[in-house]
Amino acid sequence: MELKGTVVYPGNAEGRLLVLRKPLSFWGGVDPESGRIADPRHPQHGERLGGRILVMERTIGSSSSSAVMLELLRNGTAPAGVVVGEADAILVLGLLVAQELDYPTIPFLRVGTERVAALGRADGEHCTISG
Amino acid sequence: MNDPALLLSDDEAAILGGEAGPAQRLAMRIVVRMGEILGARELVEVASAHIDGCLYHGDGGTEFAERLVELGGRTAVPATLNVGALDLLNPKRVRSIGRRREMALRQMKAYQALGCRPTWTCAPYQSGHRPAAGEHVAWGESNAVAFANSVLGARTNRYGDFMDICCAIAGRAPRTGLHLDENRRATVVVDTRATSRALKERDVFYPVLGAWLGGAVGDRVAVIAGLPATVTEDQLKALGAAAASSGAVGLFHVEGVTPEAPDLATALGGARAEAVATPEPAELRAVRDALSTDASGRVDAVAVGSPHFSIAEFRQLEALLPSAPFAVPFYVCTGRSEHRRLEREGRLSRFGNAGVKIVVDTCVVVTPVLPPKGGVLMTNSGKFAHYAPSNTGYGVVYGSLEDCVASAVCGRVVRDESLWN
């Protein structure tokens, strides 16, 4: 599968899609050490973000989610890439800071909410991002 | 890539080019990049900052702050600091967190080295940091953002970790969101006339209204009509904190009370409201019930002071201090400036003698303070009620300050239900 969209942060990635069935706040919702979804109320509780291309409409919740993104990148537990529907500043900020600290970074793509909705059935499919 | 139409002034371009030094350059690079992503056309000069990034979440945050220090970073505007992970005045208050303690302390020191004032409070607006109405600022910490925008009429977006310090060093923020007039006018009217005046005069009402507001409006701007003109600053603080926890409320107006809402028409910017929402008494009652996760009547600890307790709130508590000892630990979280003032006025010992444990520079939901055995926490704070279960593992019961004191003495939940029936 090929995804086209606006490159918010460039890079190349490949991996299986992880399409979130419910919005997720990274702060309080993702364990920065393991990269697992840690919110027990989330339907994908326990899934690992590492190596996956994370697809979601938008991020919600605390602005400290930027800090969690930075820790995931630092710890090597971040997703391989992120695809969002709407503009998001919080997770990208974690990426910009990671770049300044010479941590590894990942591509971040914005594809529009309709495209994200259409990806709902593609969970688990293999996908490549080149940006 | 993104729309590149962000125009910089000559000064801003010079900072971005490195003329003001490498830390300014790094900070400006991030501010400009975020401005592009958010679709800003230009930057705005900010008069002050309140920094939330000093709380330790992991080593990356420490390394970023220390990188800024190494590069010679200094804040360009006055900046206060939000809570850290440690109580620096009484280190034993926070249980051992191993090497995280050292990293948390390094992070706190790095932010001080950048020129931020060591205020360590989530209520900087009660410790003298009060921007003027209309002033552009870059504030972090959701309750402080809601207060600065709503109660003071200053202008800030929700600047979280990293962005807050970059704005403070660059002295700029992207001119977008709540910096712009058109995004500050209310689009939703919240009509509270169905609620009894007796309830609206009580502190216990405001976190409930806030939790309802966050759920009902999300990130839209509401003007609340029908609140008594006697509503206090602490009540508005509690309202904003709860609304910013349950939703993404960064600005609300109160008709006849807050600076941008002398009347409904002004708050709405002359336009018609897109929606009118009326919290019915049964709905508020349900929101109030949902602030509690435990109905067993058990209570193992009490914590108040989120946002940090003000001097006025200490006066209220002082009047309620029981002659009988507390059966469970009673924590009050506050800023060091309030703590110092109580000490100076010779009132601190009254709280200590009554068994009140005062937590300074931090709070019970961001760092391990509560007894490790777990159980049920009682609080008068909508924000503690929201975060305590996930952050501390405690179940939670919501009640008024009076209820909290009575329950701490009995060791069982005691609540005045009459106002809610």
Image (tube, coloured by chain):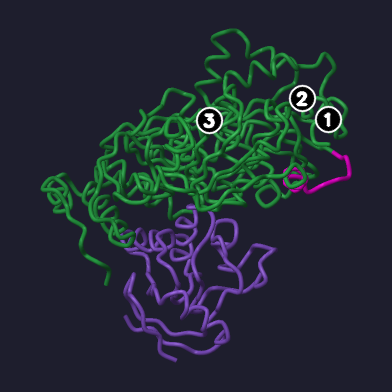
Chain colours: A purple, B green
Q: Determine whether A75 is above or below B10 in the image.
A: below
Q: Nearer the viewer, residue A94 or B171?
A: B171
Is there a contact, CB below 8 Å, between mark 1 and mark 2?
Answer: yes
Q: Is residue B51 left or right of residue B41?
A: right
Q: Identify the residue position indicated by label 1 in the image.
A: B416
Q: Is residue B106 visible?
A: no
**Label 3, residues with CA under 10 Å away: few <14, some 14-19, many ≥20:** some
Task: Indicate yes or no whether the magenta region holds residue B197.
Answer: no
Q: Residues within 10 Å of mark 2 (few under 14, many from 20)?
A: some
Residue kind at label 2, given as amino acid type: Glu
Residue named by callout 3: B88
- Residue designated by label 2: B402
* Same chain assignment for discs 1 and 2: yes
* Residue B296 relative to residue A61: left or right: right
Between B294 and B169, the residue placed more toward the observer is B294
Name the amino acid, label 1: Asp
Q: Residue B46, how many percent across, how many down?
A: 29, 39
Q: Chain of mark 3?
A: B
Q: Which residues are magenta?
A: B284-298
Q: At numbered mark 3, what does the secondary structure look like: helix, strand or loop?
A: loop
Q: In this rendering, would B338 be left or right of B401?
A: left
x 50%, y 75%: residue = A54
Image quadrant in which you'd find residue B368: top right
User: Where is the N terminus of chain A found, in terms of image quarters?
Assistant: bottom left
Point out the tag, 3 or 1, that comes first from the N-terminus. 3
Q: Is residue A23 above or below residue B11?
A: below
Image quadrant assignment for residue A37: bottom right
Query: Do marks 3 and 1 share a subunit?
Result: yes
Residue B3, x across and y down, in percent: 25, 67
